[in-house]
């Protein structure tokens, strides 16, 4: 009804005019101190990403369009805010006359008839206590005054069967319907129902009390439309609060690094880098609007019972799930994984038995698409989940091109006494500080990827070709003893039916390709043993 009027005042210049009307000369480069909380630095920003100007405060989390801004400043309703906007912008506004309907008289008659009959029956049974109780309930029902000024009516002055009218009815009864972006599901407060199904039945009954006849299926569809209009992200709220409360002491990430004790020959700087980057990825992904992905999965390798799963439960204060197995081909398993902030892939080697190409593609997806049981069509959901993995075996990586997505740290011990000293809120406050103030990237640069690949080689499962090359050649031999061998000789030595992959594998060990005359071959170390000729 009012959409056309809102569309006419949605550009960024209009928003600047509105803000300057209330707060002259405070807007600088589309930023200002938020007027809705005690803002110490400019955290409110206005922007237009192509679908109209909006504001967002990264301090207190409030946001919305021009009308919402005026409503919040003036503490007035929607219509008054719309009129005020046009007044400030000096534009004419003529709103249509809204028809209303009162339904209470019919409903009250039915309520009276019902309870009067029940009271008479109780008196006949000489149950005066029951009669008195029913009489009190009658008064309570009547006093609820079942009528609403529905904004959209048909030609017979009856409420149209549209979601907007249901939204008005719910708000009138203090029923709040929201969509949780993390769990990707509806949450309803203000009703006593234990689950969504029973809550829908309660809403159906409530609609009938107001003379607003809707089927359960229609209510279900409308509820989802209303919920998506009121989405929220509890993890974003949590992280912003951690950021606002952060004391500026940058020690908590280091404490986490110190608590993860690795073998002595492991690159300690790489450990710190991987932990830091994973924390940044984990904080960043919940802000994803469809254009962000995680860069890697923090993977703790170590013997069973050292507390790898216990650790993630301590680090993630909400929406964490452990012990899941990921199969990109199974939509149910995918949904089970992506409805949490952090999902632990327990025993990663089991997950890596799946289609590696699909798994590699899934890890870095920005969106997830699937159809919910109640949905008419598949819906795309921005990915909000970060992954953490645990594994016992030392050799588990199988995919050369995808191994860099697994940020493997070999753990010998976890110091939980030190972990317990970490203030988890301040840990995430420090991570958010790095994200917001330092603008630190979530990805590894090329040299860091090379360091990771070198480290990950220790955790790679060898194929038959690699096993043969590793066993046949003395790779510890002095370079003076290395000599040229033809490709044919090496293939025969390894009993290969095909030379596919031979060059890449030999070069990964340090052999050098060299062509002598018309023959191809490699400078390699000597063989470990001389083959006997029978």
Image (cartoon, rainbow, N blue to C red):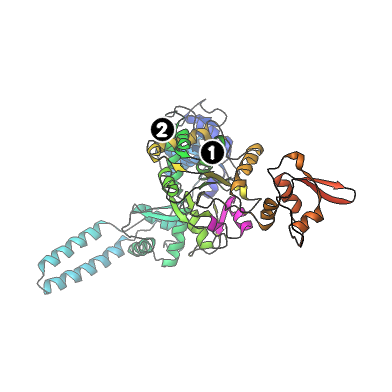
| SS at mark 2 in the image | helix
Look at the image and say whether residue 461 sits in the magenta stretch.
Answer: no
Residue 218 coordinates in the image, percent (x, y): 45, 65
Task: Indicate the quadrant where residue 501 lies.
Answer: bottom right
Which sits in the foreground, 226 or 359?
A: 359
Left or right of residue 467, residue 328 in this image: left
**Mark 2 neighbour class, 10 Å CA radius: few under 14, some 14 to 19, many 20 or more:** few
Residue 468 coordinates in the image, percent (x, y): 69, 55
Residue at image position (67%, 51%) is: 470
Q: Residue at the far front: name it.
A: 534
Q: Is residue 481 above or below residue 363?
A: above
Q: Is residue 403 above or below residue 138?
A: above
Look at the image and say whether residue 363 sits in the magenta stretch.
Answer: yes
Q: Is residue 267 above or below residue 231?
A: above
Q: Mark 1 or 2 closer to N-term?
A: 2
Residue 511 coordinates in the image, percent (x, y): 75, 45
Residue range of the region highlighted in magenta in the rendering: 349-369
- Per the model, the C-alpha gap separating discs 1 and 2 is 27 Å
Left or right of residue 125, residue 386 in this image: right
The residue that mark 1 highlights is 271
For discs 1 and 2, the disc positioned in front in the rendered view: 1
The residue that mark 2 highlights is 245
Left or right of residue 114, residue 415 in this image: right
Q: Which mark is residue 474?
A: none
């Amino acid at each position: 009804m009012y959409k056309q009027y809102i569309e006419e005042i949605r550009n960024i210049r209009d928003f600047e005019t509105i803000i300057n009307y209330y707060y002259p000369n405070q807007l600088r480069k589309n930023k200002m101190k938020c007027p809705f909380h005690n803002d110490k630095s400019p955290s409110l920003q206005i922007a237009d990403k192509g679908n109209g100007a909006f504001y967002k405060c990264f301090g207190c989390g409030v946001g919305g369009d021009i009308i919402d801004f005026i409503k919040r400043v003036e503490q007035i309703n929607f219509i008054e805010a719309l009129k005020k906007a046009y007044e400030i912008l000096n534009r004419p506004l003529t709103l249509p006359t809204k028809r209303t309907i009162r339904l209470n008289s019919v409903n009250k008659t039915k309520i009276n008839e019902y309870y009067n009959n029940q009271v008479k029956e109780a008196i006949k049974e000489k149950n005066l206590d029951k009669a008195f109780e029913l009489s009190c309930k009658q008064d309570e029902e009547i006093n609820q005054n079942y009528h609403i000024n529905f904004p959209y009516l048909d030609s017979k002055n009856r409420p149209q069967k549209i979601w907007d009218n249901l939204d008005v009815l719910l708000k009138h009864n203090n029923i709040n319907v929201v969509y949780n972006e993390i769990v990707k599901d509806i949450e309803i407060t203000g009703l006593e129902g234990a689950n969504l199904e029973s809550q829908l039945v309660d809403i159906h009954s409530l609609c009938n009390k107001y003379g607003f006849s809707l089927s359960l299926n229609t209510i279900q569809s409308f509820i989802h439309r209303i919920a998506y209009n009121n989405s929220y992200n509890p993890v974003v709220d949590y992280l912003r609060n951690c950021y606002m409360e952060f004391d500026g002491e940058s020690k908590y990430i280091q404490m986490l690094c110190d608590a993860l004790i690795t073998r002595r020959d492991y690159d300690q700087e790489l450990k710190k880098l991987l932990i830091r980057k994973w924390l940044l990825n984990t904080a960043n992904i919940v802000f994803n609007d469809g254009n962000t992905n995680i860069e890697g999965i923090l993977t703790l390798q170590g013997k069973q019972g050292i507390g790898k799963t216990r650790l993630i439960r301590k680090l993630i204060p909400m929406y964490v799930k452990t012990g899941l197995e990921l199969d990109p081909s199974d939509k149910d398993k995918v949904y089970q994984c992506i409805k949490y902030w952090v999902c632990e892939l327990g025993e990663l080697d089991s997950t890596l038995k799946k289609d590696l190409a699909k798994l590699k593609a899934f890890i870095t997806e920005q969106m997830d698409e699937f159809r919910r049981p109640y949905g008419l069509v598949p819906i795309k959901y921005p990915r909000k989940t970060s992954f953490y993995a645990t594994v016992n075996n030392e050799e588990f990586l199988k995919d050369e091109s995808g191994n860099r997505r697994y940020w493997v740290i070999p753990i010998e011990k976890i110091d939980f006494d030190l972990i317990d000293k970490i203030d988890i809120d301040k840990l995430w406050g420090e991570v958010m500080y790095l994200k917001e103030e330092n603008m630190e990237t979530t990805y590894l640069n090329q040299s860091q990827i090379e360091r990771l690949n070198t480290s990950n080689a220790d955790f790679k499962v060898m194929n038959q070709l690699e096993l043969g090359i590793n066993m046949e050649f003395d790779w510890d031999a002095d370079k003076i003893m290395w000599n040229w061998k033809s490709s044919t000789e090496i293939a025969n030595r390894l009993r290969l039916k095909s030379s596919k992959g031979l060059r890449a594998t030999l070069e990964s060990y340090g052999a050098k390709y060299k062509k002598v005359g018309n023959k191809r071959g490699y400078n390699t170390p000597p063989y470990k043993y001389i083959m006997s000729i029978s």
